[in-house]
Every structure is written in structure tokens, then in C-alpha cells.
Image (cartoon, helix red, strand yellow):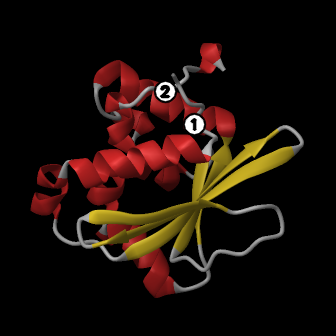
Amino acid sequence: MTHGVDTLRFFDGLADEMNGHPERFTPLGEADMSFVVAMHRPGDEFRVYVRFEGVTCTGTREVREGGRAPSDFTLEGTKEAWQAMFDDIVAHGRATGPYTINSLALMGDAVRCTGGDPMGLDKFSRFNQTLQEFFDGAARRPVAAASGG
């Protein structure tokens, strides 16, 4: 069964992929960070909180409208922008060129990295490869493509 990228089940699957393959994350070093992914959809938005400790994902939870999730940074963009990134990951086994989270956030038009604390924002850059490897886990998970809803 495939899961849409704007579901908690999808992010739980990415967490399972990370936790099931520490060999992919150990060479990158330990990452201690929390972040929120926000996907803007027509009429609402999906927000998920993700926590990394060491080389594991220790938590994912949906953040309901009006809810708060203290985090180091927020990655926000349209669902279409996120879907395009995950479609690229599935097609190539990893994000390529303009579809890496680093490229998307640096350009700032499709996905933006925001936060109120400079030290928290720094974690996006410091642990960027761990973050990308986490998202690249979508290549090994059942993901609903843009045309598949």
C-alpha cells in the first residue's frame, strides 16, 4: 500500500527506514535535531514533527492546526514541491540536482527553511546530509506518486 507524502504514515515509514539501516547514517555522524515539515495544500496544511538523536529517528508526530512543536527549524513549501522532490527520489534512488533539500531550501522559492534561533537554523546546514539521507529513504518505501494521489 502506498502512502501520500502528506501523511504521518509516510514519515513513520521514513523513520523506520532510518532506524532499520544505521549503516547509512553512522558514517554521517550523530545528529541531534528536531524539525517540522510543513506542506501547504489547498485550504489547509500538513505539518509533521521529526526528531533525530544520534543515528536514529526517535519521533514523528503530526502537528495539528494551531498546535505547537518546538523545533530547531521548519521546512515549509507546497505539497506539490515536496511531491516533486519525493518523486525524484523514487525515480533516481536519491534526490538529484535541484530536488535535493539543500537546493530547494537555498533557492527558497519552493521550500523555505525558517526558524527563530540562529543555532537551530544552523542545524539544517550542519546535519544536511543526514536530513537528505532520511528523505532519500523514500526510494525504499511505498510512495504515492503525484499522479497517483
Q: Is residue 29 left or right of residue 100?
A: left
Q: Secondary structure at mark 2?
A: loop
For disc 1, the marked residue is 5
Give the vertical position of 122 relative to 82 (above or below). below
Q: What quarter of the picture does the C terminus occupy?
A: top right
Furthest residue toward front? 1
- Which mark is drawn over residue 121? none
Is residue 125 something that shows in the picture? yes
Q: Amino acid at mark 2?
A: Val
For disc 2, the marked residue is 143
Mark 2 surroundings within 10 Å by alpha-carbon count, few (fewer than 14), some (14 through 19), many (20 or more): many
How far apart, in angstroms, are the residues tagged by discs 1 and 2? 7 Å
Q: Position of residue 109 (x, y in %)?
A: 63, 47
Mark 1 surroundings within 10 Å by alpha-carbon count, few (fewer than 14), some (14 through 19), many (20 or more): many
* Relative depth, front residue between 72 and 126: 72
Q: Position of residue 85 (x, y in %)?
A: 48, 34
* Relative depth, front residue between 33 and 107: 33
| For the residues bearing labels 1 and 2, Cβ distance under 8 angstroms | yes
Q: Quadrant of residue 4?
A: top right
Q: Is residue 48 left or right of residue 105?
A: right
